[in-house]
Image: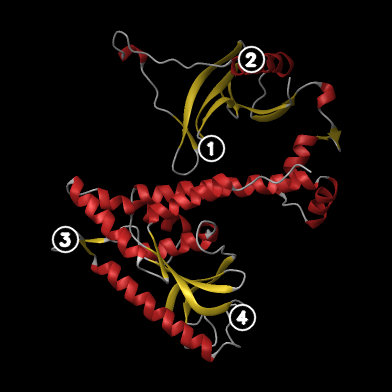
Amino acid sequence: MDIHEFTVETVGPDIATVTPDLVLQEDKTVDETPLTRTVFRAEVRSQGVRGWLIQQKRNRNEEWEDTKKIDFRKLKSGEGANIELSTEALSRVVEQYEILKSHIAQHGLSYGKQSYISGKKDEILIVNSKSVAASIASILKKQPDEEFWAALAADQPGLLRRLAYGAQQEVRRRQLRIFEYFLDDPVNLQKYATAQKLTDAKDEKIWQHYFEQNPWIFGYGLDYQYLNVLQREATIGSPTVGGTDQELIDFLMGTSEYTVLVEIKTAETPLMAATKNRSNSWRLSNELIHAQSQILEQRASFQAYVDANHDSLYTKDGDRVHQNTLNPRVILVIGRTSALAEAGSAKEQDIKKRTFELYRRELHSITVLTYDELLERARHIVATTKEPSKA
């Protein structure tokens, strides 16, 4: 029997709920992210224990919610629902039942909310009258200081690295789901802006905020490996690239040696115009052409400013920009590749894809990335990031 912590709370005469739900099994995706799961929800009475097997699904807020309840009285002949339990899952249900049955026999139903820990006596260590599990929970709630982490690093350096890796991977998977959430429906951008309490809720500003929080998305797979965002909304005509005049570019990013400019348009920006050219090609959208001319001018202005102020280039926080600026490369994030295949005949779709790809290949100093391509690159980063060794 494993150590098991649970809370029993009375909700009426002779009836109490048990939390948390006992997770029996999870259905995971290729990247080991659980999207659905089966839980056992128990309820205790003085007469005994009863419960329900429930299927849950992760919602947009990364919370688990019960799937819709089926009224079996309304099912037609041959209809029904089955929940298959593995041997391990069934054993956990039986174990939970025995724990709660023993709990009732020992404690009865005390009024209010009570927390308990069960398990073999030799599996529960008491430290200052608290279990190890409770002590660890208390430490984490108080946000461990440097002394705690230093001790852990000295005693278990491999464990500390794996904990950091696991936390980073979980954060990145969650951010990928948010990225997908945005592309599922543009309305979700506004929901995100509200949740983040953004003062400027224009789509482009929301995307800027999201990428500023997740600079790793611009990492591996491009021509450079970005270390960090040096400055959002970098400007010229000021002693700092974070000044208030003459907005230059959405992001100034840095590799180990050189600066890179990143311009952000929205995922809904069209890549193609409504009509094709006379030849076997399609017209590029005015928005795409305008974005290209805009960033070429911005790059030239930035280079001229840096040449004149190479010893006094600072961020708005006063940090010196050590990276060199030499004909900086520009990344333009705009539109969706999938939009090229959403309208018109198969022939028109092929012409649009071919035109767009030929256009990109002729750009020598600008990398044009669509949002769905950037999402795929981010997925690749998460999938290929190596876990630290156990040493």
Q: Do the residues labelled 3 and 2 touch (CB within 8 Å)?
A: no
Q: Which residue is drawn at 43% across and 84% down?
A: 301
Q: Give the label, 4 or 1, closer to the camera.
A: 1
Q: Which residue type carries mark 1?
A: Thr
Give the vertical position of 39 relative to 212 (above or below): above
Going from N to C along the chain, the mark reached first, 4 or 2, is: 2
Q: Is residue 391 left or right of residue 170?
A: right
Going from N to C along the chain, the mark reached first, 1 or 2, is: 1
Report which residue position mark 2 lands on.
91
State the image coordinates of residue 218 (x, y, percent, origin top left).
50, 60
Going from N to C along the chain, the mark reached first, 3 or 4, is: 3
Q: In this view, does 72 lie to the left or right of 116?
A: left
Report which residue position mark 1 lands on.
33
Q: Which residue is drawn at 50% across and 16% down?
A: 84
Q: Which residue type carries mark 3?
A: Lys
Location of residue 355 (image quadrant): bottom left
Q: Give the label, 3 or 1, closer to the camera.
A: 3
State the image coordinates of residue 173 (x, y, percent, origin top left).
53, 46
Task: Check disc 3: other Cα within 10 Å, few if <14, some if 14-19, many if 20+.
Answer: some
Q: Is residue 78 left or right of residue 116?
A: left
Give how far apart the Cα atoms at labels 1 and 2 are.
Answer: 24 Å
- Give the label on residue 276, or none: 3
Q: Give the label, 3 or 2, closer to the camera.
A: 3
Q: In this view, does 341 lie to the left or right of 237?
A: left
Which quadrant is the N terminus positioned in? Answer: top right
Toward the top, the furthest residue is 77
